[in-house]
Amino acid sequence: MFYYIRDILHEKAPRFLLLENVANLEGHDNGHTWKTIERELHDVGYEIDKKVLSPHQFGIPQHRKRIYIVGVRKDIGNLEGFEFPIPTNKPCDIHDIIDENESEYIPLKEETRQYIEIWNEFVQLAAKNHCKLPGFPIWAMEFGATYDYEDVPPCHQRAKQLKGKRGKLGRVITGKSHSQMMAQLPIYAQDIRKEGEKFQDWKIRYIKQNREFYANNKNWIDTWIDKIQNFQNSHMKFEWNCGSDADMTLEDKIIQFRASGIRVKLPTFSPALNLVGTQIPIFPWAHVPDSDLKGRYMTVKEAAKIQGMEELSFENENYQMSATRSFEALGNAVNVEIVRIIAEDLMDFVK
């Protein structure tokens, strides 16, 4: 797509340009991608500058780091002395975008409520037992496990080395074949590695940290762990991104179901909108209209609001987009307010 942009710049020669892309663009392909973009923009007559910014740095309740590239046509000015907007670091509050009376919402499935309820019980048990939740991902499948994992991954261990050890959720590994025993390990421990190749350092570290966490809290974890035995693998992973001083409850946090696990964060700003509709943020405290229930997904209108598009309509009498398709579009969109701030500073600078 960039080469289409280059061709438009060459043909139309606008006074200014403002581009947006993923935050790691500058480092992509060891920097070669950025060098190409920079060279092509210079060759069509523009002086450029760049910076990574996120709406949450300006009090807008969404974490979305993106690289912004500004440019001015060389024959009308330069960017010497130009500065991107300085983040205000104004506190963010997700409640600013929530409409408690919104009727067009996606309800939570009963099983989703159950997942939240059971993990909330875990968090409250931790609080009751004076346990601070760790900053690393909690892999509950590792609780009680004793299989070997550091020097030789299970895929290259003999059956007799696996048999009798404890695997997923601390269950004793049994079976007659190596494949049967492998299937009783946590899903991430079933990875097939090359001969002589160990698990990744980060995986070894997480396994070790989770085993230590379990050993230190076994007395109360064992009263709870059977409740997750039928959970999907990703729902046995839990990330507490709230720090050690937050209230130990899920009821007032933002929850997101991800492939990497159930992620919990403070109700400050939303995670970046994701193209995957199943990862829409959940507000457990939000009232569900016409019911006694609480807890629902972020609505399309709320997602549009954190992108600065609250006036945008996704339907009329002739056309209607589904909620999933709307979230996909918003997840691939640019934050309008950040663009406005940058554009105003750029045009005020080059006059």
Image (cartoon, rainbow, N blue to C red):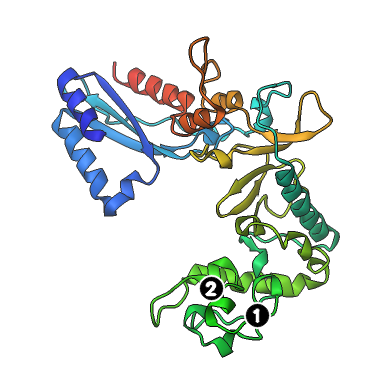
Q: Is residue 184 above or below residue 80?
A: below
Q: Which mark is residue 173?
A: 1
Report the residue marked by disc 2. Answer: 204
Counting from the top left corner in percent of width and height, residue 7 is at 17, 27
Q: How much space separates mark 1 and mark 2, taking CA atoms?
A: 20 Å
127 relative position to 42: left or right = right
Contact between marks 1 and 2 (CB within 8 A): the answer is no
Q: Secondary structure at mark 2?
A: helix
Counting from the top left corner in percent of width and height, residue 212 is at 68, 74
User: Label 1 neighbourhood size at 10 Å, few (<14), some (14-19), many (20+)?
Assistant: many
Query: Looking at the picture, which amino acid does disc 1 mark?
Result: Ile
Residue sitting nearer the eye, 54 or 191: 191
Residue sitting nearer the eye, 259 or 26: 259
Query: Looking at the picture, which amino acid does disc 2 mark?
Result: Ile
Of callouts 1 and 2, which one flags the residue occurring earlier in the amino acid sequence?
1
Say which residue appears at 28% left-offset and 52% top-offset.
Answer: 29
Counting from the top left corner in percent of width and height, residue 254 is at 67, 41
Of badges 1 and 2, the one in the foreground is 1
Q: Is residue 248 visible?
A: no
Q: Is residue 117 visible?
A: yes
User: Label 2 neighbourhood size at 10 Å, few (<14), some (14-19), many (20+)?
Assistant: some
Q: Is residue 235 above or below residue 320?
A: below
User: Disc count in the image?
Assistant: 2
**Quadrant showing the C terminus:** top left
348 relative position to 184: left or right = left
